[in-house]
Amino acid sequence: MRVTIAEINCSALRHNFQKIRQRAEARAIIAIVKANAYGHGMLRCAQIFREEGSEYLGVAFADEGAELRLSGDSGPIVVLSPPLPEEAELFCRYDLDVVACSLPAMRAFSEAARQAGCTLRAHLYIDTGMRRDGIEPSEAVAFMNACSELSNIRFTGVCTHFATSDEADRSFALQQLALFRQTTDELAQAGYRFPLIHAANSGGVINLPNAHFTVVRPGLTLYGYDPSERSEHPEALQPAMALHTRINSIRRVPANTSVSYGRKYRTAKTSWIATIPIGYGDGFTRLLTGRAECLIRGQRFPIVGTICMDQCMVDTGDVAVEPGEEVVLIGRQNNEVISAVDIAATLGTIPYEVISAISARVPRIYVHDEGTSTGLE
Ligand SMILES: Cc1ncc(COP(=O)(O)O)c(C=O)c1O
């Protein structure tokens, strides 16, 4: 078994889910578990969110939905990316909810559902400003008129997606919200009413209470991060992932010794260099070369030299660390913390990318607050 581990705290996942439920005033939740649950392990996270009462699960692609079904999940699963017509059979086989974004796709879905003898649930996707997926608001009624001629499709939902719900300036999000309301009103006047109305991603859940409608669609907050650092409503979320490893080997080197590929780092003085078995093959990106730190014995040390695919090196200076000692790359050790938010800031990216990049090679270990392992995935 590898000593490099992503430790996932199940109690934190449960806590975050319930915080979001409270914040959304008990509305139904589509727990977003795409991209391997933002790196936390899709099947186990899905199971935890279902146990906490998640009415729906949300994924990006049909094969993620199929994987959930094959694992035994029997509740509603919404696939949030626009489907290709040729995926229709997969949606029927695994009983997945589809987002309706194009007529050719919906025709293919209707035909596949007719042949399979099933009825597919669809969510009308309105593009209110993200400019990624969905139907123009001005075309929503005509689109529904065309879809109403299709058999074996039942429209249970209508949705949109925010571009800036995590930003302090709410003006564009409020514009999107107003357009969504206006469109759902026009649809209602034309006789199209939907039991599920959803728009709020994590930013929407936290910052836009008027966007909660009947269902919310949080992702990042479930895993313990607030996408809007300037949020007026800190939700006391708990980051669920810690990334740690153990020292593999150590060597004592003189001053001016170069370390790793390209000899980009040289020791300033006689130092201990510890090698740790984590690298960019684990999702610990090489872009962190010269910019990352880790925790050993509750102290911060620099990761030095070029990050390799499978290893990187730590300069512990005069501290004679030993093979086998724990090294924390994300998480807490004694009073020191390295957060995925800090790493994202260093890289000029967002915590979403840091946590979802932890690769499949890193075993996920599930623990409760007390640190007891609940098994591997
Ligand atoms: C359509 C859709 N809804 C909800 C989410 C969840 O977003 P967040 O992780 O910001 O809560 C995403 C994620 O990107 C998404 O694409």
Image: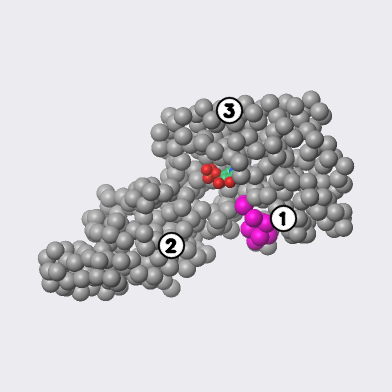
Q: Which residue is mark 3?
A: 175
* Residue positioned 75% across, 40% down in the render: 156
Label 2 environment density (alpha carbons within 10 Å; few <14, some 14–19, many ≥20): many
Q: Which residue is mark 1?
A: 84
Quadrant hosting residue 162: top right
Q: Compare residues 290 and 202 and report the one nearer the observer.
A: 290
Q: Give the extent of the magenta segment.
A: 59-67
Amino acid type for the residue under numbered disc 1: Leu
Amino acid type for the residue under numbered disc 3: Gln
- The numbered mark, 2 or 1, whose residue comes first in the sequence reads 1
Name the front one of labels 2 and 3: 3
Amino acid type for the residue under numbered disc 2: Gly
Relative side of 139 to 207, left or right: right
Mark carried by residue 283: 2
Reply yes or no: does residue 255 show up in magenta.
no
Image height of 237 relative to 190, above or below: below
Element carrying mark 2:
loop
- Residue 354 visible, this angle: yes
* Residue positioned 73% across, 26% down in the render: 185
Quadrant hosting residue 95: bottom right
**Number of numbered markers:** 3
- The numbered mark, 1 or 3, whose residue comes first in the sequence reads 1
Magenta: main secondary structure:
helix
Question: How far is the residue under mark 2 from the one under mark 3?
Answer: 37 Å
Q: Are marks 2 and 1 in contact (CB under 8 Å)?
A: no
* Residue positioned 60% across, 29% down in the render: 177
Label 1 environment density (alpha carbons within 10 Å; few <14, some 14–19, many ≥20): some
* Residue positioned 51% across, 53% down in the render: 38
